[in-house]
Amino acid sequence: MAVCLDPAAFQRHLAERGWRQQDLAVVAGLSESVVSSAARGRPVSGPTFRRLADALAAAPVVALRDLDRLIAPPGPPPGDDSTPAARPAQGVPTGGHHHGRPAPPL
């Protein structure tokens, strides 16, 4: 049994995953020409449709409304040791116990 895909829905599914047709072809184990044909709404066999559907179902969907959550807040990245707070001030001891005595001059 042959199946015809809706080209607009097909492109939307690719876009939701950040994929190109070539990416889907690789994951589905199909040739690029078969995927291109399916993307244009040409008939594909039932097993080919199943491979396309399985590949799309296995891939995470990137919701455009959630993309702002990927952006880090302003400031240095976590674990960045170049920030002033991460560096000891000059003349401040970094180890040992000095019992409230000032550090000796360097």
Image: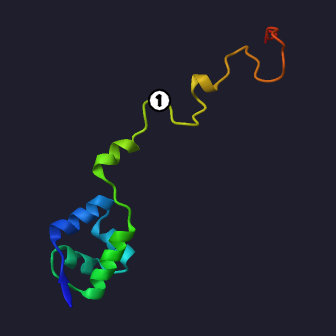
Looking at the image, residue 78 lies above or below residue 99: below
Q: Element type at marker 1?
A: loop
Looking at the image, residue 67 lies above or below residue 86: below
Q: Quadrant of the N terminus?
A: bottom left
Q: Residues within 10 Å of mark 1 (few under 14, many from 20)?
A: few
Quadrant of the rendered image containing residue 68: top left
Quadrant of the rendered image containing residue 22: bottom left
Q: In the image, what residue occupies the spot 69% across and 15% down?
A: 90
The residue furthest bottom is 1
Q: Is residue 26 visible?
A: no
**Considering depth in this image, is 53 or 38 the residue closer to the camera?**
53
Q: In the image, what residue occupies the spot 22% across and 69% down?
A: 10
Colour scheme employed for the rendering of this structure: rainbow
Q: Is residue 56 visible?
A: yes
| Location of residue 55 in the rendering, given as x and y in whole percent from the top left corner | 36, 73
| Location of residue 39 in the rendering, given as x and y in whole percent from the top left corner | 20, 73
| Residue, disc 1 | 75
Query: What kind of residue is marked 1?
Result: Gly
Q: In the image, what residue occupies the spot 79% across and 12% down?
A: 106
Q: In the image, what residue occupies the spot 43% across and 30% down?
A: 74
Q: How many marks?
A: 1
| Location of residue 73 in the rendering, given as x and y in whole percent from the top left corner | 43, 33
Looking at the image, residue 31 lies above or below residue 58: below
Would you say 82 lies left or right of 48 here? right
